[in-house]
Image (cartoon, rainbow, N blue to C red):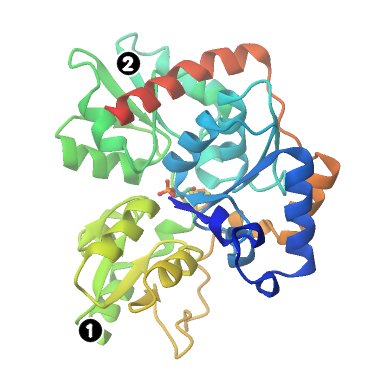
Amino acid sequence: MIDVAEMQPRAGMSKNKFTPLAHEIFTLKKQLNAVILAHNYQVPEIQDVADFVGDSLGLAQQAAKTDADVIVFCGVHFMAETAKILNPNKIVVLPDRDAGCSLEESCPAEKLAALQATNPNFWTIAYINCSAAVKALCDVIVTSGNAEKIVNAAPKDRDLLFVPDENLGQWVMEQTDRKMTLWKGNCYAHVEFQREQVLAAKRQFPDAKIIVHPESLREVRDLADAVCSTEKMITFCKNDSAKRFVIVTESGIIHRMQKECPEKEFLCAPVFNAMKLPTDGCRCSECKFMKMNTLEKVRDCMKNLAPRVELPKEIIERARLPMERMLEISAR
Ligand code: 13P
Ligand code: SF4
């Protein structure tokens, strides 16, 4: 996770680097005693005004320890809900209430409860990309950054049920040798990446390392030099000796990679033109939900303190336990 607070004007960077809109956001941030958390998939101008930019795990960890009064969550709705579960007494706002997630949509709480009722020995593990109501039904939460560790720590005498991402679940089964019943949800953006496209990239750039997010299909993961969460992707590229990488995930991450490793080259899958953008008309390297957020909407949600995340007290209480279990196991 990058702490970009240093990049803001008060840390001595050139004031000209930021637009008047960004300055308005810095002023609001001070007035509200707010913290701005942004996912690695956000547009560059949002990443650049955030206090922290990171993956789902890093952002949950930041939300758990913040002493700000207002959390401005620049990501998708389930992430802002997660921050609210960890901070029931704080105000949590997000730039666009409709920024959802296909994984969250695939797993309604009533359907999960019906499946759980078929086996009282289920130990339910939920990928963080799900609603607060689903989290409230689960034993533990995982992110792509800690799923392997948390599944390894699951009770050996329980039948594991993993929801809602079938692809991440398959990958975790391969890493841990624990058998799990998998919910059949997927990330609509990551399943668009095809084996043929990655093979073409390998032919075009034989010196490049292929870095793949575990929400991708197995046929694509099998071609990877590294399969990991967005934060671990950045660490891998920083530490690896390769000079060129093909990144198989949402394109927003390229901004941080280029900023943190200016001497290396990052190519956004699937295929590229001179501008390093996909050439086949396919928009699969963009998540339409993550891209609903704009800098104007960040300013507006801070001005209006809306849209605001509100959750029933009993959901917060029940969802907090599996979230805290995740944070505790992650810290071991
Ligand atoms: P991470 O950043 O945790 O790897 O998650 C990716 C993602 O798709 C979030 O919605
Ligand atoms: Fe959901 Fe996929 Fe978008 Fe992540 S990239 S928010 S998993 S739809």
Q: Which numbered tag is attached to residue 203?
A: 1
**Disc 1 from disc 2: Cα separation:** 45 Å
Residue 252: x and y in percent read 51, 64
Name above or below for residue 98 compared with residue 156: below
Question: What residue is pinned by disc 2?
Answer: 122
Residue 202: x and y in percent read 24, 78
Q: Nearer the viewer, residue 265 or 283?
A: 265
Q: Hey, which residue is sitting farthest left in the picture?
A: 177
Residue ID at (66%, 13%): 313
In the displayed structure image, the side of residue 11 where residue 92 appears, left or right: right
Q: Nearer the viewer, residue 90 or 103?
A: 90
User: Label 2 amino acid?
Assistant: Phe
Q: Quadrant of the C terminus?
A: top left
Residue ID at (22%, 84%): 203
Q: Hey, which residue is sitting farthest bottom in the picture?
A: 274
Q: Nearer the viewer, mark 1 or mark 2?
A: 1
Residue 284: x and y in percent read 48, 66
Residue 89: x and y in percent read 68, 21
Please tell me which of labels 1 and 2 falls first in the chain. Answer: 2
